[in-house]
Amino acid sequence: MSLFEKAVSDLNKRKQSYDRNRKPARSSSPRMTWLKVTDDPQEVVIRSPLEWWYSHFQPSIGRSRRCCGEECKLCKEGMSVQLRFVLIVQCEDGSIKLLELREKHEKEIEAINDNEHGQVGAKIRLAKAWRQKNAPVLIELIGREPVVPIEASRIVRSLGLEPLRI
Ligand SMILES: [Zn+2]
C-alpha cells in the first residue's frame, strides 16, 4: 500500500489509526508562511517528506480544528473530516514555504513520488487551473534536484485549533 493509499484509507478508519499519544507540538521553529498558488505558474522544489493531518472546518468560528479520531466530538456529531496534505517547498527566490494540497490532489502527489526519496527533491510547476479560490491545483513534475530534506512533522502537528474531545 502506498503512502497515499494509506492516508486516504486512514481517513475512512480514523478510529483504528488514531494514535492517542500523538500530542500536538508547540512550534519552536520560525514561522513559515503558506505558498499562495495562483493561476500564474511558479516552480518550486519539494524539501520535506509528505505530511498530512485531518481537520474539521467549523463554520461558526470560521476556523479549522484538528480531528483526534475516536475521541473526537465533531466526528461524533457527524461533521465531515478533511484530509490535508502539507509539504515544505523552496521557491525560485530561495524562500522556504508551506504548501497545502487537498485530498483531490492525491493522484498528482503520487505522480511526483519516487520510491527512493518520496516527493523530496521533486521540482514541480504549480498553478491553479483557473482563478477561483477552490480551483484544483495543477502539478507538473519538471525535474529532480538533490536537496537536504526538512522535517515538517512538528509544524503539521501544530496546525489548526485544539481538537474537541468527547
Ligand atoms: Zn474528528
Image (cartoon, rainbow, N blue to C red):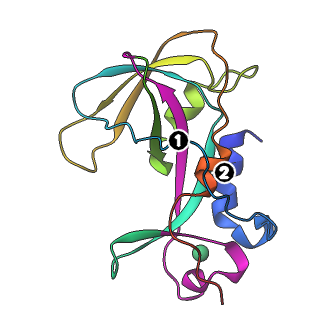
Q: Nearer the viewer, residue 130 or 33?
A: 33
Q: Is residue 67 magenta?
A: yes
- Residue highlighted by disc 2: 7
Q: Reply above or below: 103 against 93.
A: below
Label 1 neighbour load within 10 Å: few <14, some 14-19, many 20+: few
Q: Which residues are magenta?
A: 65-93
Which quarter of the image is occupied by the C terminus?
bottom right
Q: How many marks?
A: 2
Q: Is residue 19 above or below residue 77?
A: above
- Residue at point 59%, 75% (across, down): 163
- Residue type (three-letter) at the residue carrying disc 1: Pro
Q: Quadrant of the N terminus?
A: top right
In the rendered structure, the answer to whether residue 142 lies left or right of residue 151 reads: left
Q: Is residue 8 magenta?
A: no
Task: Tell me: residue 123, above or below residue 11.
Answer: above
**Foreground label between 2 and 1:** 1
Provide the secondary structure element on which disc 1 rests: loop
Comes first in the chain, label 2 or label 1:
2
Seen at 63% across and 40% down, the residue is 152
In depth, the one of 138 and 31 nearer the eye is 31
Indicate the quadrant where residue 11 lies.
bottom right
In the picture shown, does residue 26 fall above or below 56? above
Task: State how far apart marks 2 and 1 are (Cα).
Answer: 27 Å
- Quadrant where ligand 1 appears: bottom right
Which amino acid type corresponds to the residue marked 2 in the rendered image? Answer: Ala
Direction from residue 90 to residue 26 in the image, left or right? right
Front-lying residue, 13 or 160: 160
Q: Secondary structure at mark 2?
A: helix
Residue matched to label 1: 30
